[in-house]
Image: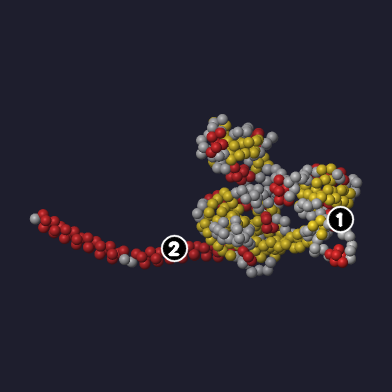
């Protein structure tokens, strides 16, 4: 009986199972089609989001063209036994070979050409203020801007900040479309972003990608680096253009790419807009960008060094190696071997982050600095000083440029390596006035001034003092090196 009973129960169970399957199939059969439609709809929504951003933001993205006169000295190829150099492109090459003249000693003949750099920018106020990159317009003699299909107009350089690679220019116009600025600190890795610019002269090109990383640094392209990394396509001509979030607000200024070919390879970088805002607010007021300064030399804490300080290996922070005399750090009581772990209650992850956060504060700002000293936590208060000019970037005064026809700056280790002056001392020529006596005597950008009136000069201060003294004599004897040869140059000076 149980068997029958069992069979009856089994038969009933079969009916139940079949009924459930039929109902399941009835409702599930259309799901592949529904899923496909849902996926297409989702893609349509993403596409519409990008289209909305492009429509809203593109009118405020401009083309920027910067022009500059470049002076250069044609290369020479070998030394003549009489001390002059042989230049196969020289105008009197036929004299040398067919008229049997001895080579004539003369100053190198400089040539000049007009260099044009093209990039992007974006309008951030209806009266025509534009944000772009300093490396695009910083040294330009003339800047032209193209808004939409309108003819190009000349722009005024309001101010530049080489330390962050930010520049502000302005065109004379009103009621212009402009972009709103977001809070780049709120940007998260993985978020969608859109880049708009003028790569290869293709105006208002729109590309999309995600935020690949934040806080990138170490490229030595600017003093303050805190780049947003993105895989949105960025190519030559995109520099200075906006990187936007899905609200069509600017989160960064597209600045450079890493590439083995010169074109897009999925690794682009943008300056966080918060860093640009800090510079903009001062530049637009006609002021220099002043940054907070603590006055320490530090080392990044590593698991190995953390253990040496008696700390857990996973401790994050920076260890103070030196406190600069009479600095905000010294006045606050910071000491060598202190480990800074917090700034205004926020953790210090690495040295570059700490440097940027301090630099984004105005001189005179009071900050709370959390430290570990001898294994104990303490909090000190520091009143930030004013960040001094970066060593090695101080040019001579304008009056010196006017008197000599050129300006100089200190020779840094980086410049020495780049220019081949590793074993020499002096000051480097950074600018030469067109038509000046310095230009006519062969002074060129990149040359090293080693001596003034037979006395070595090691920095711009010594150079200026020597020129001031030479002014009483009416002329100055310079010992210069162009990376190949050392020679004398005599310049006349106005009597003082």
Q: Secondary structure at mark 2?
A: helix
Image vertical order of residue 486 relative to residue 94, above or below: above
Q: Secondary structure at mark 1?
A: loop
Q: Give residue 353's position: percent from left, percent from top.
A: 58, 45
Which of 269/445 is in front?
A: 445
Q: Residue at x 86, y 44 (%)?
A: 454
Q: How is the image coloured?
A: secondary structure
Q: Residue at x 77, y 51 (%)?
A: 483
Looking at the image, can residue 354 be seen?
no
Which mark is on residue 42? 2
Residue 338 quadrant = top right
Q: Residue at x 49, y 64 (%)?
A: 47
Tag in front: 2 or 1: 1
Q: Is residue 80 left or right of residue 321?
A: right
Quadrant in which the N terminus appears: bottom left
For label 1, the crowd category at 10 Å Cα-Cα, with few meaning under 14, some 14 to 19 and many 20 or more, is few
Q: Give residue 41's position: percent from left, percent from top.
A: 43, 65
Q: Give residue 76's position: percent from left, percent from top.
A: 79, 58
Q: Which comes sooner in the sequence, label 2 or label 1?
A: 2
Q: Give residue 9's position: percent from left, percent from top.
A: 15, 57
Residue 372 quadrant = top right
For label 2, the crowd category at 10 Å Cα-Cα, with few meaning under 14, some 14 to 19 and many 20 or more, is few
Which mark is on residue 82? 1
Which of 270/246 is in front?
A: 270
């Amino acid at each position: 009986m149980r068997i029958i009973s069992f069979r009856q129960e089994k038969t009933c169970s079969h009916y139940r199972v079949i009924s459930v399957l039929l109902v399941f199939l009835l409702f599930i059969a259309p799901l592949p089609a529904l899923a496909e439609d849902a996926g297409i709809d989702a893609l349509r929504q993403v596409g519409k989001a990008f289209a909305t951003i492009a429509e809203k933001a593109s009118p405020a993205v401009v083309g920027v063209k910067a022009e500059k006169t470049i002076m250069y000295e044609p290369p020479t190829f070998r030394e003549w036994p009489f001390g002059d150099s042989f230049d196969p492109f020289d105008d009197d090459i036929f004299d040398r070979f067919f008229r049997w003249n001895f080579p004539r000693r003369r100053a190198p003949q400089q040539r000049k050409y007009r260099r044009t750099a093209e990039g992007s920018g974006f309008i951030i106020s209806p009266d025509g203020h534009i944000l772009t990159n300093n490396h695009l317009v910083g040294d330009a003699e003339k800047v032209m801007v193209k808004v939409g299909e309108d003819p190009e107009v000349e722009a005024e350089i309001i101010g530049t900040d080489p330390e962050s690679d930010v520049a502000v220019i302005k065109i004379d116009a009103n009621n212009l479309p402009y972009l709103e600025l977001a809070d780049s600190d709120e940007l998260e890795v993985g978020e969608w972003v859109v880049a708009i610019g003028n790569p290869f002269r293709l105006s208002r090109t729109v590309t999309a990608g995600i935020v690949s990383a934040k806080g990138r640094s170490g490229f030595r392209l600017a003093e303050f680096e805190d780049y947003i990394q993105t895989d949105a396509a960025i190519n030559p001509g995109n520099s200075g253009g906006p990187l936007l979030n899905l609200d069509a607000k600017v989160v960064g200024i597209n600045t450079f790419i890493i590439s083995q070919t010169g074109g897009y390879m999925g690794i682009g970088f943008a300056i966080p807009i918060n860093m640009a805002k800090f510079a903009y607010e001062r530049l637009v007021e006609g002021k220099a960008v002043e940054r907070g300064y603590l006055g320490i030399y530090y080392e990044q804490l590593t698991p190995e060094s953390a253990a040496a300080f008696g700390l857990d290996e996973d401790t994050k922070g920076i260890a103070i190696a030196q406190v600069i005399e009479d600095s905000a750090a010294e006045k606050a009581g910071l000491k060598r071997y202190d480990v800074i772990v917090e700034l205004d209650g926020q953790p210090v992850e690495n040295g570059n982050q700490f440097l940027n956060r301090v630099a984004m504060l105005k001189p005179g700002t009071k900050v709370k600095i959390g430290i570990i000293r001898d294994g104990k936590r303490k909090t000190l208060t520091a009143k930030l000083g004013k960040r001094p000019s970066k060593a090695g970037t101080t040019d001579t005064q304008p009056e010196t440029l006017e008197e000599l026809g050129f300006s100089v700056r200190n020779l840094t280790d980086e410049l020495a390596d780049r220019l081949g002056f590793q074993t020499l001392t002096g000051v480097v020529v950074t600018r030469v006035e067109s038509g000046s006596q310095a230009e006519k005597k062969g002074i060129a950008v990149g040359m090293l001034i080693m001596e003034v009136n037979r006395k070595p000069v090691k920095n711009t201060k010594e150079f200026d003092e020597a020129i001031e003294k030479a002014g009483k004599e009416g002329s100055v004897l310079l010992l210069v090196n162009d990376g190949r040869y050392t020679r004398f140059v005599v310049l006349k000076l106005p009597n003082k």
